[in-house]
Image (cartoon, helix red, strand yellow):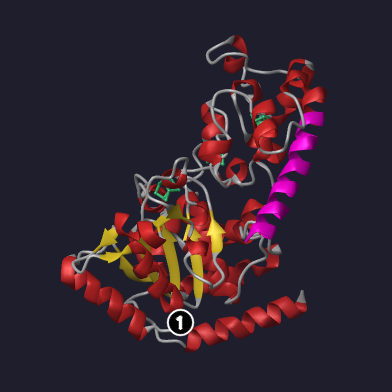
Amino acid sequence: MKDLQNSLDLRLAQLQALPKMKDGSIMDALKSHGFSRRDFMKWAGSMTALLALPASLAPSVAKAAEMADRLPVIWLHMAECTGCSESLLRSDAPTIDSLIFDYISLEYHETVMAASGWQAEENLEGAIEKYKGQYVLMVEGGIPAGQNAFYLSIGPEGKTGEAHAKHAAEHAAAIFAIGTCSSFGGIQAAAPNPTGAMPLHKVTNKPVINVPGCPPSEKNIVGNVLHYLLFGTLPALDSYNRPKWAYGHRIHDLCERRGHFDAGEFVETFGDEGAKKGYCLYKVGCKGPYTFNNCSQERFNSHTSWPIQAGHGCIGCSEPNFWDNMGPFEEPLGDRLYKSVFGGLGSDAVADKIGIGVLALTGVAIAAHAVIASAKKAEE
Ligand code: FSX
Ligand code: SF4
Ligand code: F3S
C-alpha cells in the first residue's frame, strides 16, 4: 500500500511538471456548472471505488483529475453510430464525468470540434506531430481493412480509416478501443460483414485496451482516462484485453434481480405478473450470465438506470460477436450457443426447473466463457 502511494506520488509529480494546456482549473469549470469541491471529492471517492483502489487513494484520484489537462487525447471515428461519444457527452446537464472529459486536452474529436475538411486534417496531423509519443489515442468504430479499406474514407484526401488509425496508433503512448465496434468489430462486422470490418487490435501491432459496450458507460470511458493519468501504465486486463476493474464480473453476478433467479422466479412473457414484480429476465432472453461488464453497479445516464432495471434483458453488448452469438435477443441462449460454439454442451431445459437448475447451466456458461477466451487468445 505504501509502495502504491509512493509510486502514485511520483506519477503525480511527473504530471505536475508537464505544461498545463487549458486556462483555468477544473474546479472553476465545475463551479460554473454548480458543483462544489465537496461534490468533486465525492465523485473522486466513487471513481476510486470503481477502479478497485483503496479508499485512502481518493485524494490522489482527485489530484490526477485536476491535472487532466496535461493529457493530450486524439479521438478517431471509424464505422459506427457515434453512440460511444453520445454516451459520454449527451446527458441533459453536464456531469462531473463529462466536464472532466471536456477538461482533458482533447486535441482532435470529429463530433465535438469546430474544424472540418482541410483544417481538420491539419489539426490531426499537427496534434500527432506535436505530441508524438505522449498522446492517448481513443478509437471508436470498426475498421474496414485490407482490400476492403476503401469502404471507409475520411477527410478531404480520402484517406482510409485504416490508414488514419494505423498512423495515429504508431505514435500513441496508449491506445484504447472505445466501444464494441472498435474492440471486436461490432455491428458492421456481424455476419456477413460486407465491409470487412475489423477491430482496432487487428490493424495495429501495438497493445490495445478494449473498452467494449454498445455503448460503454461514461464511467468506463472516463475511468480509463483517469487510470492512465494515475498510473501511466496499462491496467490489469482479461483475456479479451478488457480492464479487469470494469469487466471483471458478469452482469449476472451482481444483478439486482439475482434473488429472483435463485428463487426460480422468472418473467415468462413481457408484461406478465412476473414482469410487474421485477422477476428475473432469463427466460425472455437475458444474456447477463454470459456477459462481463459493470452496468449493474454503474448504470447509465448519471447512474439513472440500465437495461435490466428498465425491464429488458442484457443483450451481451460487451462480448465479442454478440450480434451473431447472442441473438435472438428475447430468447434464452441455451442450446443454440452451445451447439454452434461449444459443441452441444448445456441445455435450456433446466431453466424450466427453477433457478437451482439454471445455476448449473450458468456454471457451464462460466466454463464456456473461459474456453472461448483461451481459444480466442490462441487464435491471435
Ligand atoms: Fe455505436 Fe460506438 Fe455501438 Fe459501436 O458505440 S453504440 S455501434 S459500440 O462504436 O457508436
Ligand atoms: Fe439478472 Fe439476467 Fe441474471 Fe436474471 S439472468 S439475474 S435478469 S442478469
Ligand atoms: Fe450491454 Fe448488457 Fe450492459 S446489454 S449495456 S452489457 S446490461
Residue 194 showing in the rendered view: yes
Query: Looking at the rendering, in which quadrant would you find the C terminus?
Result: bottom right
Q: Position of residue 5 (x, y in %)?
A: 69, 77
For the point 52% across and 63% down, the residue is 201
Q: Position of residue 274 (x, y in %)?
A: 63, 14
Q: Is residue 98 above or below residue 17?
A: above
Front position in the image: 361 or 96: 361
Answer left or right for 369 relative to 285.
Answer: right
Please tell me how crowded label 1 is: few (under 14), some (14-19), or many (20+) other residues with Cα within 10 Å: some
Quick one: SS at disc 1? loop
Q: Residue furthest bottom?
A: 17
Front position in the image: 21 or 237: 237
Answer left or right for 39 relative to 54.
Answer: left
For the point 72% across and 40% down, the residue is 253
> Toward which corner of the image does residue 315 lie, by quadrant?
top right
Q: Position of residue 92 (x, y in %)?
A: 34, 44
Q: Position of residue 311 (x, y in %)?
A: 54, 25
Q: Check residue 332 for magenta coloring.
A: no
Per the rendered image, the range of residues in magenta is: 360-380
Residue ID for mark 1: 134
Front position in the image: 203 or 173: 203
Residue 255 showing in the rendered view: no
Task: Decide whether the magenta segment is chiefly helix, strand or loop.
Answer: helix
Q: Is residue 253 above or below residue 59?
A: above
The amino acid at mark 1 is Gln
